[in-house]
Amino acid sequence: MANLTLLQAVNDGLKIAMREDPSVLVFGEDVGPKGGVFLATEGLTAEFGEERCFDTPLSEDGIIGAAIGMAMNGLRPVAEIQFQDFIFPAFDQIVSEAAKLRYRSGGQYTAPMVIRTPYGGGIRGGLYHSQSGEAYFCHTPGLKVVIPSTPHDAKGLLIASIQDPDPVLFLEPKALYRSVKGEVPEGSYSVELSTMRTAREGDDVTVFCYGAMVPVCEQAAESAAASGISVEVIDLRTLYPLDEEGVLAAARKTGRVVNVHEAPRFCGYGAELSAIIAEHAIEHMEAPIMRVTGFDTPFPNTLEHNYLPDHRRVLDAIERVHAF
Amino acid sequence: MANLTLLQAVNDGLKIAMREDPSVLVFGEDVGPKGGVFLATEGLTAEFGEERCFDTPLSEDGIIGAAIGMAMNGLRPVAEIQFQDFIFPAFDQIVSEAAKLRYRSGGQYTAPMVIRTPYGGGIRGGLYHSQSGEAYFCHTPGLKVVIPSTPHDAKGLLIASIQDPDPVLFLEPKALYRSVKGEVPEGSYSVELSTMRTAREGDDVTVFCYGAMVPVCEQAAESAAASGISVEVIDLRTLYPLDEEGVLAAARKTGRVVNVHEAPRFCGYGAELSAIIAEHAIEHMEAPIMRVTGFDTPFPNTLEHNYLPDHRRVLDAIERVHAF
Amino acid sequence: MSAYEEFKVLSADGSAGDHDPGLSDEGLLHCYRTMLMVRAFDDTAMKLQRSGRIGFSIPNHGIEATQVGAASALKPSDWIFPSYRDFGMPIYHGVEVVEMMHNMFGNAMDSAKGRQMPVHFSFEDPIRFVSISSPIGTHIPQGVGAAHAMKLKGEDSVALISFGDGGTSSLGFHSGLNFAGVWKSPAVFLCQNNGYAISMPTEKQTASDGFAVKGEAYGVPGVVVDGNDLLAVREVTREAVERARAGEGPTLIEALTFRMGGHSTSDDPTRYVPEALVAEWEKKDPVPRFEAYLASRGLWKEGDREVLYEECMAEVKEAADVAQATEAPSLETIFSDVYEEVPDHIRAQGEAAFDLLRRKGDAAAGDGEFPL
Amino acid sequence: MSAYEEFKVLSADGSAGDHDPGLSDEGLLHCYRTMLMVRAFDDTAMKLQRSGRIGFSIPNHGIEATQVGAASALKPSDWIFPSYRDFGMPIYHGVEVVEMMHNMFGNAMDSAKGRQMPVHFSFEDPIRFVSISSPIGTHIPQGVGAAHAMKLKGEDSVALISFGDGGTSSLGFHSGLNFAGVWKSPAVFLCQNNGYAISMPTEKQTASDGFAVKGEAYGVPGVVVDGNDLLAVREVTREAVERARAGEGPTLIEALTFRMGGHSTSDDPTRYVPEALVAEWEKKDPVPRFEAYLASRGLWKEGDREVLYEECMAEVKEAADVAQATEAPSLETIFSDVYEEVPDHIRAQGEAAFDLLRRKGDAAAGDGEFPL
Ligand SMILES: Cc1ncc(C[n+]2csc(CCOP(=O)(O)OP(=O)(O)O)c2C)c(N)n1
Ligand SMILES: Cc1ncc(C[n+]2csc(CCOP(=O)(O)OP(=O)(O)O)c2C)c(N)n1
Ligand SMILES: [Mg+2]
Ligand SMILES: [Mg+2]
């Protein structure tokens, strides 16, 4: 066991995966000698050589397109997109190609690959270094979407994603890169995809969240406990395919639900959680299903702390559904 | 009044807008002499000249990027994307640029423009000529998303979209291009954005839908009426920004809701409808909020009639929420 | 005037000077037969579409030599990243026409399980002919990625990446060629300049002086070849393949040819293609040109074409009948192959679909007409 | 060797032969002062960032001549589609440094209302300096669209579109240059080849022989210029602007220069830039080179730089103090300018935010550190 930041856990997971499987490659903009702008790939070129960890030209379309071709031809590419905000030039490759290759070829060609990218707010990045685009990808059959919130899960989920036979979008909450630390087992292990984690047990209200919102929700739960409200916090970890039965069980347990994410509300991921519950467990609901999310605006800079859901806003929703 | 197909109504709307305002331009792949692959732009080059209706190279990124620049500099571009499935190379321009320009420049620069594109199934187009991507764009603050289902609305909404000061994605249900006909006023008129239309009144169940699903839902409502269930069919027309109060009022009226669309279910537009209702009107709900949607798979070809929601599936959901 | 001279081998009378095609008589006749088979397949597909038996096809008439010449330079261990107009490549390499017909009918035997539109073939065997995608250009960086993998794995293979003049405006062209240049990938880019991208003539597509020059933007050498000269296409492709195998990097080939039909069965080219242009290219038909060459080598005589074409037609028609008689894909195929394993939510949707089928009967097939 | 010869005007000793810069003494001194102002702004911004007063900046040291030379070829009615490193262009055209400082602090007076990161300027006046966007290359086709509009509207303006060596790999470069070539747009493309895209040297960016040659892929003539030679950059830009105004179409200018600092305040260039390279470029500093020229015209003497730099510094520091003392944007600015009119759902979210503020107090500002 080592006590690592989430960023170190990602780095460790990459190294382990590369040591275990020589077909694993890492590439993207500035991931080589510089080690990536967040240093997530630090030391990889030194250990594995330029053939296995290398820089690419400034084209996300090229990065993902090439990754698909490599994956088709037996390699296990782990492509980095420098910020999730810059994934959109590759949207066509991800949505039209990686996600649909197996289906359209009747299983003849597949694209087992991982796209790693830092996402979310918290670093004063403004409109273009703060976005949370998970809903776009969760609306795309053929992709898997994974978001860790602890160092332990970051490493275990990353290794599982690299071993997965399907394309995985691995979104790393950049706000947590250096702000959370935790025990991380040495060596290889994996956290099964499509399983969620109960971050905190509780009986009165269920909060669904992921990524950098997990500590925020934990803090809100802590405050709620002080006023006698027992809150269960569920860290979804894999957003797609989702463990829907798990979500329904957790929702039914309390009958009061708050869904939290950083992305804008409208057509955001929280809508899907609400809809699943409203379709399959509405009779267990004792309060409106609430959402605490980023506003339906672009992401501002100076006022990002007002844009991002914080424990005050989450707590307010918890109190409302509890009082309903 | 003329009796026009939806396609003719679009063509008429374009002509009227171009006659009224010399700054309106139409361009895209094959929209010039060929008149577009669906003939939506037929006759425009002949009437307005190559300067106002012209072909572009095969680059959606270029089409939308250039449209933004033209819009910034005082023109009113109406850009065609040949199929909505091919909009993804322009995703970055739409999501990062058109949608965010006004915000990030504090209102100094704006992009009043329309992106017209045929969407949805019904023509045996398989994975790449059938998709319904509305949810991607409805999760993007700064855009407006409009979908007509009648010739009257197609023309009136298109004219309103062209006059709108913000970027509008105008999705045309290609399955209805030639299959619906209706009375269309001559000359200019507009249908206000962000207003919905009651396609059929009813008291027992509310069905929310748009585009090519409107006639499907009307047919299902007709069948339901035969067995004594009175169904209200709401054609949303503008998906974003949505008339949320209108949605809530219609949902409360019956207490039983079915949301219908062609796109995959997970994180689809129906999820947002369910979530709005579950947040603000759950206490009026007398049944689960159901969704009838495309499956969470890519769009198949031979079996598209099994993939697309049809009146059987909608009726089944209506019966279920009614019997609950 | 282009700085790139158009490479030709065959003169109008069929002589090829002392050019060595590097093919046996049998090999030459295989090329010839493949061209006729493409023509038979093409003609049949058009008729099948006109008579409503299939929904869509893509004309191939006029461009057969480019496809067959290029395909003939590949080994079975190479990979093809094709365009939708590349019927000749799988046929050359031995894919059975009935396999292709299964795709045209989207039936249960289709390798794509009826999920794709007609002409969106996918084959693994006897050569990798990678599943065709409709979005233009996306396969270009993918081919470069596959080629890079060949290099990293030490394979002696190359990737042939084929696209049209319109395809050069796509994002994939830009990123694919750039990456291949930097990586010195064993990739061969085949730009089939057939004059049009749907209704757009090349001068509306780009202001560059042809397409081969575009390679210079990426450090990728370009070459222009007469695309209706099978031996010339074969030759430049062989050279490019050799360079690639030798680790010398990619080549961009521009093959000058012409799409004699419409863009697809849904297109009316008379709206935008000048008649004179068609007449001009009719004279350059690659089939009689290759026949003259075969004749000069004593491998062909008047009347052979009709006989062989009839043979091909018989095979294609038989294949069409077999494909049409084959059942549609099962409902289950909607739900499989999204992931390696079917996730719960998709399984549940499939079960609900079967349940509905049992309770309310089958959905009615629509009769949508494809416009493009 | 590149086919493109590097255009230069200034020799090392500052002589310019019989070159006519087309500028009065006052104009030449304005260029000089602008370079020093950029340097003062840059130095100040770095210090403000290091001391935690602002979150981020982008070094400009070494590339001042490219920016100022190019800007000097424009009229106020022209449009600039800038990169984030183009501090010199607005300053040349008379934007007040305090306006720029408001942006660096993201305060209530910032034209972007504190929504953007520092250095993401937007100005309308005295020249259109279009709101900078972080995604690389997206502004290139936009500039072409704006230029096309100028042409259609019969305006006598041009669009100067500026980007880096890395930017040439972007999708926007490909579509933008292609459209401009076909449309013969009044656009001038300025590729500032400053050696690196973050940590990527140009040889990892592309295998082409420089960047000017990339224009050939689009029928856009290319020209290479010494980017540290203000008069040379001014001259090639003037020629390009003249061609554009005359309806002769776009030009691609490659300016050879060097980013003397890191990519940004978050970057440590010693990890990847060889020291020797920095030393080599230090000798080519554009400021002393231009000073030698001014001196040769009797417009400059030893000691002038220090005096002028101090003046600039005083102005910049004053601007920084003013900007820092200016209040933060109001909460309302989160919700406005998404659309021309605030829609109901956004209004409701804003009201809820104000309500929460009243009930639970203000949110705590984070102290996130920007890594790029
Ligand atoms: C990204 C994208 N945009 C538009 C289309 C529609 N489309 C299909 S084929 C085609 C023209 C392609 O022309 P070219 O590359 O020259 O190939 P050809 O058909 O001539 O063989 C277009 C515009 C598409 N398939 N993908
Ligand atoms: C689409 C996109 N991908 C990645 C980035 C991250 N990024 C910011 S600047 C930069 C390098 C740009 O290099 P260049 O174009 O040479 O400009 P320079 O910084 O040298 O002026 C990168 C990769 C981005 N902003 N946008
Ligand atoms: Mg073509
Ligand atoms: Mg650079």
Image (spheres, coloured by chain):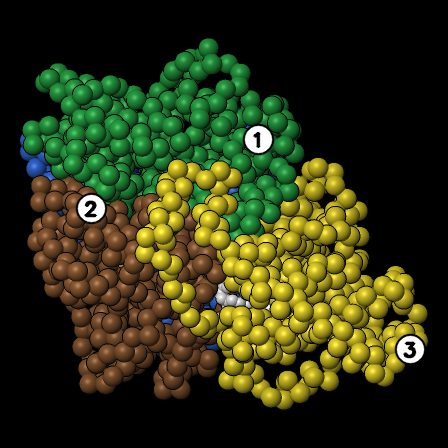
Chain colours: A green, B brown, C yellow, D blue
Residue lying at the far top of the rendered structure = A1
Give me the residue at 57% from left, 74% from top.
Answer: C48
Q: Position of residue D212 (x, y in %)?
A: 59, 58
Give me the residue at 26% from left, 32% from top.
Answer: A248
Q: Position of residue A156 (x, y in %)?
A: 46, 23
Label 1 vs label 2, nearer the camera: 2
Question: Secondary structure beneath disc 2?
Answer: loop
Q: Name the residue under label 1.
A: A33
Figure quadrant of residue B310 = bottom left
Q: Mark 2 points at which residue?
A: B289
The answer for how far apart the CA atoms under marks 3 and 2 are is: 76 Å
Above or below D304: residue D154: below
D125 sits left or right of C238 in the view:
left
B246 sits left or right of B268 in the view:
left
Q: Indicate the amino acid at tag 3.
A: Ser
Give me the residue at 64% from left, 28% from top.
Answer: A22
Q: Where is residue B69 in the image (x, y as percent from the top left)?
A: 36, 63
Q: Indicate the amino acid at tag 1.
A: Pro
* Residue nearer the viewer, D370 or C26: C26
Q: Indicate the amino acid at tag 2.
A: Ile
The answer for how far apart the CA atoms under marks 1 and 2 are is: 53 Å
* Residue nearer the viewer, A123 or B189: B189
Q: Name the residue under label 3.
A: C296
Q: Mark 3, chain letter?
A: C
Q: Where is residue A230 in the image (x, y as percent from the top left)?
A: 16, 19
* Residue nearer the viewer, C150 or B181: B181
Label 1 vs label 3, nearer the camera: 3
